[in-house]
Amino acid sequence: MLVQNKFESMCGIVAYIGSREAYPVVLKGLKRLEYRGYDSAGIAIINKGLKAYKKQGKVANLEDELVGKEMHSHICIGHTRWATHGEPSDRNAHPHLSGDSKLAIVHNGIIENYAQLKHELKNQGHIFKSDTDTEVLVHFIEEIRNSNFCSVEEALRIALKRVVGAYVILLIDQDNPDTIIAARKGSPLVIGIGKGEHFLASDASPIIEYTKEVVYVNDYELVILRADELILKNSSNEIQTPYIQKLDMELATIEKGGFDHFMLKEVFEQPQTIFDSLRGRLDASKGTLNMGGLSEYAGVLKDAKRIIIVACGTSWHAGLVAEYMIEELCRIPVEVEYASEFRYRNPVVGPGDVIIAVSQSGETADTLVAIESAKEKGAIILGICNVVGSSIARLSHAGAYTHAGPEIGVASTKAFTAQLAVLCLVGLMVAKEKGTITAQRFQHLLDELDAIPDKVTSILALNEHIKIIARKYKDARDFLFLGRGYNFPIALEGALKLKEISYIHAEGYPAAEMKHGPIALVDENLPVVFVATKDTYYEKVVSNIQEIKARKGKIIAVVTEGDQVIPGMADDVIFIPEADELVAPIISVIPLQLLSYHIGVLKGCDVDKPRNLAKSVTVE
Ligand code: M6R
């Protein structure tokens, strides 16, 4: 798969064709995709002609606008737009129409050569109503159809040969009211198969309510969809057999289930999601570990001259923890790379290297493009993804799903702890294969992992206590998060979570590094969160706490139950159960997630959809 997109957008796409009223299905689907981040929404239906409606702002604005309008139709395409070309506005929202208003298009992605195409089309007399690349595309298709006297499908195929960029496109045609045409390159598209009806969406969440049978469209495929017919073609116009998969999720798993926010629900799901990430893989009672498809690569991993972990954001933090785990367990050098940097600095990578791509969504453009070029250079690619069937999962030679279920809150929580659990299993699998772990330590760590879900449950019982701490510090201007060893990446993750959710400036540092600069920030107004569990670094961290205390910083400490030293020094303490330091990050991050959540809520922030952020960052 080739991904060339430089600025692909994070829009959402939903469509329906069948015997139901199509508009309510699409409207509901757009609401389910709101988590992706967007600035405007629109739909098109065919009922006595093609009608398109679009509105800047939330899907609810569009819904209000359409109250009382005749919306009857059995075909509907819908879109949530995240602006790339042209400001967020009604005018620039999708769908866009052809010059004769017979074709409507919604598009997720970027047409990189749109300026050239627009110039040519203007010379041919086309007039544009928006600033978007998408409107150029629908005019281009119209121009080809008119000048070649061909079908819309054929015109689209010809148009895509000239288009540079990434896209998912849905097209409807007033003269063919029983067909939706779709195409994909570099952006996700799922088809839901019902009885005499079909659904299309950027991910499965708008579809799951109606059917569990889905087809993931591949790059360069064209879809011709009718109520009772699905035709899939490759770029050479050859018919493909759709690979129908069964979705393994329930509607309840993508709804809030009584919690105020998805984020809180997802934090509280962690005993179960961590259990699910281990289930079928770890059997502590028998002392066994089975990593399914990944087991076939245990030998490759064992012999790897180095392992490179590529990821972004929270997944990158999981990669950092894995660096500590894998180096300790397997004695293999591990490098952890920001995917965006890895790709562009022309890294030395090739046969013998194993790349582990870590991604919740499996669609992050930076990560996807990074592993694509490493694969071309001969590296083995292993994926650790949450979203089943995602692009990274499909591009990888092998991998393991984290099984955390759909993560709707933009801030990653349960996906992170599931990543840590799976990466720990990978480390253990390779260590066993390589003989770098004793049988006793192997069994001990299996037992430790097995015990994690219960420990998480006991930490969640501290929710009210953490809320009180949040109230005390919610007005701070800055925060510092410090930790050492396995807890250093957790300090980074704590800072990222707070920034995302509460918009408070926060920095994470290795606790010892603090005295090389950040200590200058410390005064009586600066809360400093120490992740200071009982581990190899404990005594050193105690000294670091003293250094902060001496400068009047406020100490919030996450410590191991039974600790009697740090509580005497800290302003606020959160006790968590004892755990081996190798697995401790899986639990020490939980109080930090809750702290960020409560501070965000107390400050009135939109914690599930923080400003400027999108769940799946398909922008390079
Ligand atoms: O889907 P991915 O794990 O590849 O996403 C990577 C980052 O975009 C993601 O972790 C981001 O940092 C989250 N907002 C963190 O909460």
Image (spheres, grey):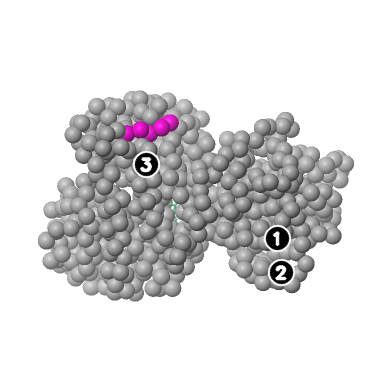
Any part of residue 167 in sight: no
Label 1 sits on what residue type?
Tyr
**Residue identified by numbered label 2:** 66
Residue 293 lies within the magenta run: yes
Q: Split into 4 quadrants, where in the image is the N terminus?
A: top right
Along the line of sight, which residue is nearer the eye, 619 or 192? 192
What residue do we see at 45% from left, 70% from top?
605
What residue do we see at 66% from left, 58% from top?
25
**Residue identified by numbered label 1:** 23
Label 3 sits on what residue type?
Arg
Label 2 sits on what residue type?
Leu
Q: Horizontal and vertical percent for residue 555?
A: 22, 66
Q: Are marks 2 and 1 in contact (CB under 8 Å)?
A: yes
- Vertical position of residue 559 compared to residue 157: above or below: below
What residue do we see at 27% from left, 58% from top?
458
- Vertical position of residue 38 compared to residue 242: above or below: below
**On the rendered structure, is 517 left or right of 97?**
left
Magenta residues? 289-294
Q: Which mark is residue 279?
A: 3
